[in-house]
Image (tube, rainbow, N blue to C red):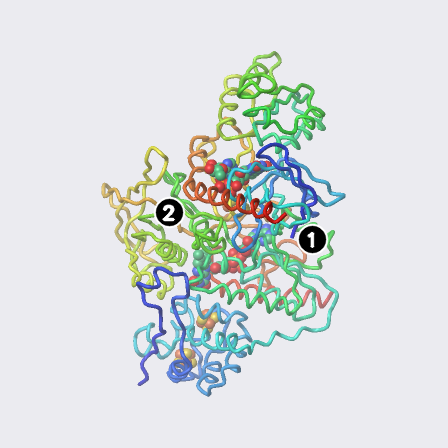
Amino acid sequence: LAIPPQEMPAQDPIARGKTVSEVALGYSEAQARLEAERCLNCKNEPCVKGCPVQVPIPRFISYIQKGDFKAAVDTIKETNLLPAVCGRVCPQEKQCQLECTVGKSLKDVGKAVAIGRLERFVADWERENGKVTPPTVKPRTGKRVAVIGSGPAGITVAADVAREGHEVVLFEAFHKPGGVMVYGIPEFRLPKSIVQAEIDTLKKMGVKIETNFLVGRTRTLKQLLEEDHFDAAFVGVGAGLPKFLGCPGENLVGVFSANEYLTRANLMKAYDAKKAATPIYKSRIVAVVGGGNVAMDAARMALRLGAEQVHVIYRRTREEMPARAEEVEHAMEEGIVFNFLRNPTRILGNEQGRVVGMELQQFELGAPDASGRRSPVPIAGSEYVFDCDTVIVALGNESNPLLVKTTEGLVVDKKGRIVVGADQKTSLDAVYAGGDIVLGAATVILAMGEGRRAAAAINELLAKK
Amino acid sequence: MNRILKKTQLSAEVFEMEVEAPLIAQNRKAGQFIIVQIDSEWGERIPLTIADADPKTGTITMVFQTVGASTHRLAAKNVGDYVENILGPLGNPTHIEKFGTVVCVGGGIGVAPLHPIAQAMKAAGNKVIIIIGARNKDLVIFEDRMRKIADELVIVTDDGSYGRKALVTEPLKEYCSQDPKPDLAVAIGPPIMMKFCAETTRPFQVPTVVSLNTIMIDGTGMCGGCRVSVGGETKFVCVDGPEFDGHKVDFDNMMTRLRAYKEKEEEDHHVCHLELQIESMEHKGGR
Ligand SMILES: Cc1cc2nc3c(=O)[nH]c(=O)nc-3n(C[C@H](O)[C@H](O)[C@H](O)COP(=O)(O)OP(=O)(O)OC[C@H]3O[C@@H](n4cnc5c(N)ncnc54)[C@H](O)[C@@H]3O)c2cc1C
Ligand SMILES: Cc1cc2nc3c(=O)[nH]c(=O)nc-3n(C[C@H](O)[C@H](O)[C@H](O)COP(=O)(O)OP(=O)(O)OC[C@H]3O[C@@H](n4cnc5c(N)ncnc54)[C@H](O)[C@@H]3O)c2cc1C
Ligand code: SF4
Ligand code: SF4
Ligand code: FES
């Protein structure tokens, strides 16, 4: 416990506020080995229990201690196909690192072994040194599987099913595969080249990728199964239906869903105004409503697109924010202003129908609610006007109804999430589902975990067929 | 990749293009649209209606007006060139049934998306009255094709250079005043035209369908950029529409939202014109 936690180098907060290149720079070899030395190799492996896919953490860290980075990354990949992604975007402080013995004995999760950073380090090392070995693919079975949606859930299923020798076609509505990892999470947090490398691996394994293909419209799920001879299908279409505020003024010019704002900026590359044909709104003062990762991404993106001031408006306090701790810290360092215990009651516009401000109501914390967090209670008569010209709504996503609407017999719950059994099977024969469309807006690692289970069930089904 | 098989210039600003898109050609129905992106790296995703399709040849037809950068770039493509990305068919098909008498009103480029709808309405056994409106004679498109379908056809121009000198709302009002009045009106064109068509039919209580052309990105219900207020509720044009009850649409808000990126669009359009001019000069110089 004598070794201090190794900080991850990052770009200077002021300079990085003007570029979209990655903020966190990753460990050097020496730093990674020092950080690995902090791990006690606990026999009872509490950290593993905190990880949704049970990465064999002490084992992979012990390989880093020995300097065998390839063995370390291969160990992670036994249960987690996308370590370069998860190392960057997992909410580690609430999962693996929350349970870490070192953090517990120092009474600070922030001082736990930096499992995520180590995971990222070995995955980057493998990719940058050209050491990636595509998984071996068994001989062709002649069976066909349709994977719908190319987010982390779909990518995982495609890889696991292709490995067994089945033919896999990955269908994606957008012109580029990757799901939220390419259209939502910004470059400065997850470089698109990393996602592309994973897609390239899938292609090397023989997975066919059909972009510009909206299942339900271009072909229906039924057509895929009955006319196009797919033996099984996996539905991983994500959440992707933005929530709005439901208050007056939400359709004024200058009010965006975080999905729209981020898609314009990331996928459509509007950050490069000279080259990109897709425009993005010019803002001076931006208010982002929400407290999750999506809100942090939108706020930090707005800053990079040239806003003079960026404010986050959140109903509760920093304690209750669902965003990853590292993103909140980075946002604060970059100069984003946090307005806690506030919520808009309406958005105000001028004669041209453009946003000029918001009416905000103040809140205080009351008793804990169903989520276990203290609930925000509005203070009557506390409304005041807050000047801004852009409002980005980042209150999360609900289930996109398109595929369900066009697929007869696919059972969903009240919130439109597809209902599945323990093996991810839906109400339809040979149709499985996983990721955000089942969980509601969740996380990359949970989406992958569901993908793994679904792939195992699909492989089992096809082995019997 | 979708190859361009045919390109025709219909008027100074309007082009018709037939492109390969076999799956879309097979599944599309009247009233649906596509999203077109010229190149994956830097291109914009723009919605265009499917004006026609042939499942046998696996082609679809789009008709578009050059209003800004992306439509100009598309118009600069030629037969044999490719459009990198086409997604579709999107949106809900038009509700077609035997209503009785249907008045179809098309303004400017709106006549193209109106064509498959008028065709389907006719095929369903309706009496189809078609009103075509344009700023001037040069901008009248699809006259022959519409004439083949229409039981009655009226052409109006703003300046009287062709047909009657009037706005489309004039003949529309006359038809609504007849007894029996039409059972349905379908209006497609610039938002301002659709707004006034809806205002014209409202006192006669003639149900009026409009097809909205908001700004879009994904076309799958993911971004909410296409939202409009219909009967006080927020709707997404790409998945809830594109057709709505014209008497319930908040057109003023929709028109305001269409102007969201005015500055950037004007700048790009300007640059685009210059580039096209330079290109065409180089072209000429090279010959
Ligand atoms: C801005 C933002 C930041 C986030 N930050 C984090 C983070 O830091 N850490 C974390 O763990 N999680 C984060 N998340 C959540 C995480 O990205 C999601 O939980 C995860 O991506 C869900 O994966 P998925 O495979 O279920 O679906 P998605 O990634 O949503 O992918 C679904 C794909 O399916 C496609 N699709 C939809 N319908 C169809 C159809 N009918 N036919 C064909 N294709 C279709 C979509 O275009 C999309 O590409 C963030 C989310 C957002 C929006
Ligand atoms: C469902 C749907 C179907 C459509 N079908 C057709 C069609 O069949 N043929 C056709 O020519 N156009 C159609 N449009 C409109 C077309 O999408 C726009 O003209 C196009 O996006 C403009 O792109 P641009 O880059 O050339 O111009 P921009 O530079 O983006 O815009 C130039 C000007 O056009 C206006 N404009 C921008 N977007 C739109 C829009 N979506 N609709 C109307 N005006 C707009 C703006 O006021 C702007 O000042 C349709 C739109 C929708 C939503
Ligand atoms: S996948 Fe996520 S939770 Fe699991 S060990 Fe890696 S960083 Fe931790
Ligand atoms: S709990 Fe912490 S110290 Fe123990 S094995 Fe896991 S990472 Fe290492
Ligand atoms: S275009 Fe994105 S939701 Fe309609």
Which quarter shows the N terminus of chain A?
A: bottom left
Return the x and y of residue A415 as percentages of the image width and height. 50, 49
Query: Does residue A237 appear in this view?
Result: no
Q: Quadrant of residue B10?
A: top right
> Compared to B203, does B214 lie above or below?
below
Q: Is residue A159 left or right of residue A375?
A: right
Which quarter shows the C terminus of chain A?
A: bottom right
Question: What amino acid type is highlighted by mark number 1?
Answer: Leu
Residue shown at the point (39%, 54%) measured from the top left? A298
**Mark 2 lies within 8 Å of ligand 2 (Cβ measured):** no
Q: Distance between the Cα atoms at labels 1 and 2?
A: 43 Å
Query: Does residue B229 appear in this view?
Result: yes
Q: Residue furthest right?
A: B56
Return the x and y of residue B181 as percentages of the image width and height. 60, 15
Secondary element at image label 2: loop
What residue is disc 1 on? Answer: A224
Taking depth in this image into account, of B272 and B91 the one nearest to the observer is B272
What residue is disc 2 on? Answer: A282
Q: Quadrant of residue B263?
A: top left
Return the x and y of residue A409 as percentages of the image width and height. 64, 48
Q: Residue furthest top?
A: B179
Chain letter of the residue carrying label 2:
A
Please tell me whether mark 1 or mark 2 is closer to you in this view. 2
Residue shown at the point (70%, 45%) measured from the top left? B5
Chain letter of the residue carrying label 1:
A
Question: What amino acid type is highlighted by mark number 2?
Answer: Lys
Secondary element at image label 1: helix
